[in-house]
Image (spheres, helix red, strand yellow):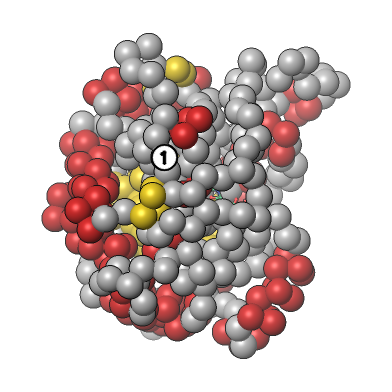
Amino acid sequence: MPSAAPTLWSPFKIGPIELKHRIVMAPLTRNRATKNDKAERTWVPNDLMCEYYSERATDGGLLISEAVPVSLVASGMLGVAGMWLPEQVQGWKKVTDSIHAKGGKVFAQLWHQGRNSHSTVSGVQPVSSSDVPITDSPHAWAGLPTEPFEVPHALTVEEIAATQDDFARCALAAVTEAGFDGVEIHAANGYIFDQFHHSNINTRTDQYGGSIEGRTLFTRETIAKISAAIGADRLGVRLAPFGYFNQTRGEHRVEQCTWLCTELSKLGLAYVHLIEPRFDEIKSENEKLASLGQEVASEEVSLKPFRAALGSTPVIAAGGYNADNADEGLAAGEHDLIAMGRYFCSNADLVDRLRTGKPLYRYNRARFYGPFKQNEIGYTVHPEQLGENVPMPLGD
Ligand SMILES: Cc1cc2nc3c(=O)[nH]c(=O)nc-3n(C[C@H](O)[C@H](O)[C@H](O)COP(=O)(O)O)c2cc1C
């Protein structure tokens, strides 16, 4: 008898981890960490973050943490806890304990902002594949002056190896000390990996540029180092094949990502996490799809080629999922799990709401990214959901 098509409520296994449903909390940077009094310019996880994550954890459900910088030079925002100092690792352990207490599973998303960082945050010149800055927008975040992005330092081959080692070290600390069930590398949205992937950013003429194989080498080598440290079945990889964020406009998107996915299919990874073409940080769904249609053949504007290239590697799809469309692609076998981001911000009990058909609360963009004086508002406390007509706190 053919087995029934999967639904949101079908169990699934990634690596050694048994999941009881298919709804994943997408990585969400919320900038609510506490300043570290032991080291300048660094931040540590706190009790508020434990509360936030534990509220969103469900028995047998997977959460992916907010993006976690692997070093100081990797960091470009305030209020974001990294994981390279002992006190950061200890702070994350409290977060993972609070998730595990609810029966939840959690992967740490490891992050390096590359040229998207700024010396006002890290204290040092940002780095990237090449000395090509972001020119289409300024560096503008809460608590910081709005400034143009800086010209990054192009990493030498030795510095590339050291950066990859930062990822591997952080991954090892994540699973052996901080209690994470695995790690995901943030190879999407225009950060360091994408800065190697995209030909409009990566102008290198050595082995790390110049071709599909070259532009993906940084990513593939980092994956190999992390896999050697913690096992490939504890490693996920997030990719945005159609992303525009942080001026990612490289050529041969579909061909390159398909080739990369074919390589990834050989590694026994926990999963590959793909962002849907329709999602964009700035453009509406229609604008984004229209724009992509001019760039690549319209029949290619889909995650299908990557799913096919990945073979049996589990696929998480994210971007634009809601109560109405959450289970569409699962039954059709287009992916194995879906991740939701913005609705998890405003619905701590999102999984229960989807299960019972209760309506979802709308999200409040103004409270996405801290730090705020009252960090809990729009994070663990949602005044508008309590029916209170509370204006945004003054001074935030
Ligand atoms: C407040 C906020 C923070 C985000 N932070 C991250 C992040 O740290 N890492 C990441 O890969 N994506 C990040 N994203 C993107 C989400 O993970 C997700 O891909 C996107 O919101 C689309 O999913 P959605 O339509 O369900 O919101 C963020 C999105 C939002 C709204």
Q: Closer to the camera, 125 or 48?
A: 125
In this rendering, the answer to whether 257 lies above or below 382 is below
- Residue 171's quadrant in the figure? top left
Q: Residue at x 66, y 76 (%)?
A: 292
Q: Residue at x 20, y 61 (%)?
A: 224
In this rendering, the answer to whether 210 lies above or below 58 is below
Q: Is residue 27 left or right of residue 210?
A: right
Check the picture and name the quadrant holding the C terminus: top right
Q: Closer to the camera, 213 or 319?
A: 213
In this rendering, the answer to whether 18 lies above or below 211 is above
Q: Residue furthest right?
A: 389
> Looking at the picture, how far across and down is residue 125, in whole percent?
41, 40
Total residue callouts: 1
Q: Residue at x 60, y 79 (%)?
A: 301
In this figure, which residue is indicated by the disc labeled 1? Answer: 125
In this rendering, the answer to whether 346 lies above or below 394 is below
The amino acid on which the numbered mark 1 sits, given as a three-letter code, is Gln
Q: How crowded is the residue under tag 1: few (<14 C-alpha within 10 Å), some, or many (20+)?
A: some
Q: Residue at x 21, y 31 (%)?
A: 177
> Looking at the picture, how far across and down is residue 331, in whole percent?
53, 73
> Looking at the picture, how far across and down is residue 43, in whole percent?
41, 23
> Looking at the picture, how far across and down is residue 46, in whole percent?
43, 19
Check the picture and name the quadrant holding the N terminus: bottom left
Q: Can residue 28 be spotted in the picture?
A: yes
**Mark 1 secondary-structure assignment:** loop
Q: Residue furthest left?
A: 228
Q: Is residue 13 left or right of residue 326?
A: left
Q: Can residue 52 be spotted in the picture?
A: no
Q: Closer to the camera, 184 or 153?
A: 153
